[in-house]
Image (tube, rainbow, N blue to C red):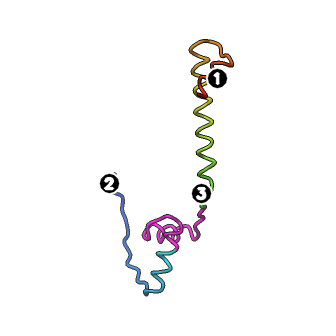
Amino acid sequence: MRKYKQVKEKKVTFDMQEWAEVERRAAAAGMKTGTYIKKIAVNGELTYYDMQQTAPLVNAMRTISNNINQIARKANETHSIYAEDIEILRG
């Protein structure tokens, strides 16, 4: 088996207007231009989801999971959990 995989390199020429559009689309997808061109050429289409709007939800879920983890840790330490233990964890 070869140490390196075989590759094929191809030179593609764009005019300035086409290249600006490729750069714009690659930036919108959060990709480098070369990666964007390769994905489009191989797959024919690219699905991009803007996940920035979900960031607050993900952060809230991290906070909740951290709180649950603290409660579970306390319950495992003492083999029981009381309301005042939860208040201590909140504070």
The residue that mark 1 highlights is 86
Q: Distance between the residues labelled 2 and 3?
A: 40 Å
Mark positioned earlier in the residue sequence (2 or 3): 2
**For residue 16, which quarter of the picture?**
bottom left
Pick out the residue farthest to the top: 79
Which quadrant of the rendered structure holds the C terminus?
top right
Q: What residue type is labelled 3?
A: Met
Residue depth check, mark 1 versus mark 2: number of the one nearer the observer? 1
Residue at the left extreme, as displayed: 3
- Give the residue displayed 59% in from the left and 38% down from the top: 63
Q: Mark 3 points at which residue?
A: 51
Rendered view: 84 above or below 15: above
| Local secondary structure at mark 1 | helix
Residue type for callout 1: Ile
Q: What stretch is highlighted in magenta?
A: 25-49
Residue 87 in the magenta stretch? The answer is no
Is residue 49 positioned above or below 86 on the image?
below
Q: Earlier in the sequence, mark 1 or mark 3?
A: 3
Which secondary structure type mostly characterizes the magenta part of the structure? helix
The disc label shown at residue 2, or none: 2
Residue 27 spot, x, y in % from top left: 49, 69
SS for dot 2: loop
Q: Kindly report which numbered mark, 2 or 3, lies closer to the viewer in this rendering.
A: 3
Q: Nearer the viewer, residue 52 or 31?
A: 52
**Image x and y of residue 41, in percent:** 51, 72
Does residue 91 appear to the left or right of 13 in the view shown?
right
* Residue that protrudes farthest toward the front in the picture: 91
Q: Say what amino acid the circle numbered 2 marks.
A: Arg
Where is residue 77 shown, x and y percent of the image? 56, 14
Disc 1 and disc 3: Cα gap in Å? Answer: 33 Å
